[in-house]
Structure formats: structure tokens, C-alpha cells
Amino acid sequence: MKDTYKVVITGGGTAGHITPALSIARSLIDNFQTKIYYLGNENFLEKELAHKEGFPFFHIHSQGMEGKNPLDKWKNFIARNSKGIIEAYRHLKNINPDFVVSTGGFVTAPVLAAARLLSIPYFIHEQNTVMGRVNKLFVKNAKEVYYSFEETLGGMSLREGMAYGNPVPVNEAIKPGNSLVVLGGSGGSEFLNQWTLSFAKANPKISIHLQAGRKNVEALEVQKEKGELKNLTIHGFVNIVEMYERAKVVVTRGGTSSLFELANAEIPSIVVPLPNSMDNHQYLNGLHFQQLGGMKVVEQSEQKSGNTLDKVAIEWLNNKDILEEKRKNLQNFTYKNCADKISSDIITVMNELT
């Protein structure tokens, strides 16, 4: 057992990977003697958020998979990440961490590859119902694997693990607000942005808050002014808890971190999965929460063919009984305080190794 553990955290590209990474890091600091270092790509959101938490940040180059067939994708992936592996190797040599915690995203591949080369123990957390490609590549040699869903654990032939849920900062119910809140993910969603403009124009008495992604705000403000949409407030990257506090109903993409937070906050939500998400994981994520009775999945094709999203949103906003039933069903959601469970297990494993 060591007095203080040095820990490298990695996970990035989108808030869906970064949020659980930072939640685990905070739990490790709050509950154990640890020093945190963050490895990621400075061109994405992880640098900003790691700095906000006060964690030293180290940049590594990383790129996703490109190519027309699986073999080409893997060849390109390895070639384009070789620089990142060298950078990660040097950072890990200098930091000399006791272990690495990875929460997915292509940026984690060079870090985990370097950790294996240096025989540094690593732990993996998988957010989605379907395991991501990088996690699949490195899962066999992980000291422990943590899953968000029992479904993932049950269908995972590569490696057993524990289904603790998704470590997110929101773990308590939030008092219902009065607005429709639309969440397009950290980068925003063109489909949800345009749908929100249309819905706001058709329903001027409904207060709407849209998390549109920073890069989209300026153009959307022009469209808002042109359409005289006084009932619509447009946000870039936001304090998510403040958005939840405004929400009577949420329309969201199917990222796992968002769905876990909304379930913990007991906010009735309509899930519009990204149609081209890897292995259709956003649809499967949403389906899990729909089966709990607190959310509903509406696919983009359903909106285009029959305005289904409009109909469901209006029905929920105007029916207190539906919302009360959804909130009550979400009270049965049991995956809370996941970060503390994961951090405690990690330290237990490390204490056994040292």
C-alpha cells in the first residue's frame, strides 16, 4: 500500500468521455491520497475542462479511424497515432504513474498502448451499451473493467467486469423547471438546432432553452432574430446543472453521460439518437432508459415522416400526469454515486498489487 498514488487520467473528444473521467478523478482526490495528471488532445474539450479542475494537462496527437474497409481503418489508425504513442510513452516515463484510468475516445489509444509498453496497470470504463473500438482493443489486459449497463456486461465475451453505471456529477433529483430544454451534446446537433427553431416558432408560448454548441451560436442567433423567437434562449457550452434546473422536459441526444445525469436528476426526457452513432449505441442507450419508463426514444426519421418529436414534446409539456409518472419511474434508477464505487475498487485493486 502506498501513501500517495500518482494517477494518469485519459478520455476525450467529447464530453461523454470527459465527464466520467473527471468524475472518477475528483472521487480519487476526495477519498484517497492521489495526484492526478490528464493526458488528452489539446484540440478538444478535455484540455479546457481538465484545466478548470486544476489538473496538469499533457497533449498527445490522436486521430480516429478513416478508410473504406476495416483493414484500411486499422492501418490508418495505427499510422496516424504512432506519434501520439511516442508522446504518451515519454509523458508516462516522466510522470511515472502508479496506474492509468481510461474512459474511452480515440485519444486514449496512444495512452493505453504506451501504458502496456511500460507495464503500467490500467483500468477501463465503458459508457455505452456497446463497447467502443479502442476499449475492445485494450480490454483484455486491463486490471479491471467497469461498465455502465448490465446489458454490456452480459454480452461481453472479451472480458468480465462490474456494471457500476456511469460516473457523472449529477446524482440527485432536481426540482422541475418550466421550460423545454434541448441538449445537442458538447458540439451541438444540427438536426436538434434546426428542429428547435421550428418548434419555437410554432409554439411561441413555450419557454425553450437550447444548448447548441459554441460554434453554432452566432448563426443561430441570426435565425432567432429573423424569426422573432422571443421564447428561445440559445446557449453554447453551458453549466449543465443550470440547464437541468430550467427543465420541465428535456430533448437530448443519446449519449450515456447525459442520460445517466437526466435519470439521476429525475427529468422526463425525449431521446433523439444520433442516426450514425457507432454500432447504433445511442439508440440502444436510449432504449435502456425507455424501458425504465422515464424516457422515450424518437428517431430522426420519425420526426421527418410524422412530426413525432413535436407531438411527444407538446403532449408531455401539457400533461402533468405523464410527467409525474416519468419522474416516479426514474426514482427507481439505482446507478448513483458511481464514481465513488469505481475509485474505491481501483484503490482496492492497487493496494493488493503493492
Image: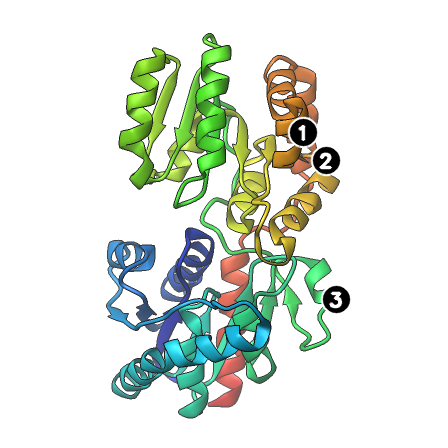
Asked whether the beta carbons under mark 2 and mark 1 sit within 8 Å of each other, the answer is yes
* Residue 132 coordinates in the image, percent (x, y): 57, 65
Q: In this view, does 235 lie above or below 324?
A: below
31 vs 147, nearest the viewer: 147
* Residue 352 coordinates in the image, percent (x, y): 53, 86
* Residue 190 coordinates in the image, percent (x, y): 44, 36
Quadrant occupied by the N terminus: bottom left
- Residue at image coords 36%, 70%: 62
From the image, state whether disc 2 or disc 3 is nearer to you: 3
| Residue located farthest toward the front when viewing the structure as drawn | 68
* Way the structure is coloured: rainbow
Q: Is residue 106 above or below residue 283?
A: below
Which quadrant of the figure has residue 310? Answer: top right
Residue occupied by mark 3: 155
From the image, state whether disc 1 or disc 3 is nearer to you: 3
Q: How many marks?
A: 3
How far apart are labels 1 and 3 at the CA level? Answer: 28 Å
> Which amino acid is tagged 3?
Gly
Residue occupied by mark 2: 293
Residue occupied by mark 1: 326
192 vs 169, nearest the viewer: 192
> Which amino acid is tagged 1?
Lys
Label located before the other in sequence (2 or 3): 3
